[in-house]
Amino acid sequence: MITLALSKGRIFDETLPLLAAAGIPVDASIGASRKLILPTGDPGLRLIIVRASDVPTYVQYGAADLGVAGKDVLLEHGGEGLYQPVDLGIARCRMCVAAPAGFDYANAVRRGARLRIATKYVQVAREHFAAKGVHVDLIKLYGSMELAPLVGLADAIVDLVSTGSTLRANNLVEVEEIMRISSRLIVNQASLKTKSGTLEPLVAAIGRAAEGAR
Ligand code: PRT
Ligand code: MG
């Protein structure tokens, strides 16, 4: 049995068409189910539903052979024990620095000001500001980063942006793009050896499906 870890929401919704194109139909209505272990049209492949940030952990320890995770999540996790063979090109967004419309971020950076940055992505943020030589105090949050500058918790945030409507709704503007983000197929390195006969063709088929969807 092969186990594929997915998170609910955009990753589940955007992975199903790739699985279908790879010859693995999944009944989309099971997405609404509260079951955490779901069958697929292939009796040798099951899905498990976990939090987006937990996908690399399940795959790292081999509780899932494969998973789909955002590059943001993989960078924070560190990627230990994971093979990352395919960029699926799904769940695209960008990691950005955003600040209140009235805050002159570029000027604060030029002056060498020490900035308070709220984010869920402390590893990526630390590396980004260190590479630019910007002094920052990082404040770890688990969600709703957009609120932090509005109530004086931080000068700016590092968050994911796709349409930009969440920033606009909160009177924030993107002041710097850190990187483009998409989701990757990740594979447990030990599974790839012990189950290579089934995993290799599956990874190749999903890779072709992703290529075809571009
Ligand atoms: O929601 P939960 O806390 O369970 O976990 P999660 O947020 O990690 O999961 P989920 O399903 O929301 O996101 C899974 C993956 O989708 C992320 O790891 C990203 O790689 C990718 N992705 C793509 C996004 C977005 N686009 C995105 N827009 N993840 C989050 N957002 C959020 C963003 O953080 C911000 O709050 O959506 C808001 C901005 O969206 P716009 O459209 O208003 O710009
Ligand atoms: Mg979310």
Image (cartoon, grey):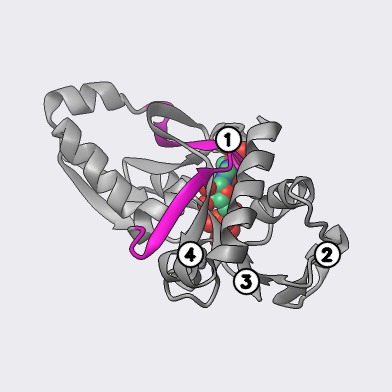
- In x, y percent, where is residue 173? 46, 28
Image quadrant where one finds the C terminus: top right
Magenta span contains residue 208: no
Vertical relation: 206 (above or below) 50: above
Residue that numbered label 1 is attached to: 162
Distance between the alpha carbons at the discs numbered 1 and 4: 33 Å
The quadrant in which residue 159 appears is top left
**21 or 170, nearer to the observer:** 21
Can you identify the residue that label 3 sits on?
3
Q: Which residues are magenta?
A: 79-102
Question: Counting other residues with Cα less than 10 Å from the Cα at mark 2, is it few (<14), some (14-19), or many (20 or more)?
Answer: some
Whole-percent x, y for residue 123 in the image: 29, 52
Q: CA distance from mark 3 to mark 1?
A: 29 Å
Q: CA distance from mark 3 to mark 2?
A: 13 Å
- Give the class, few, some or many, for how many residues have Cα within 10 Å of label 1's Cα (few <14, many ≥20): few
Circle 3 residues within 10 Å: few <14, some 14–19, many ≥20: many
Q: In this rendering, which labeled residue sits more in front, label 1 or label 2?
A: 2
Residue sticking out furthest to the front: 197
Is 65 positioned to the left or the right of 150 in the image?
A: right
Which mark's residue is nearer the viewer, 3 or 1? 3
Q: Nearer the viewer, residue 193 or 62?
A: 193
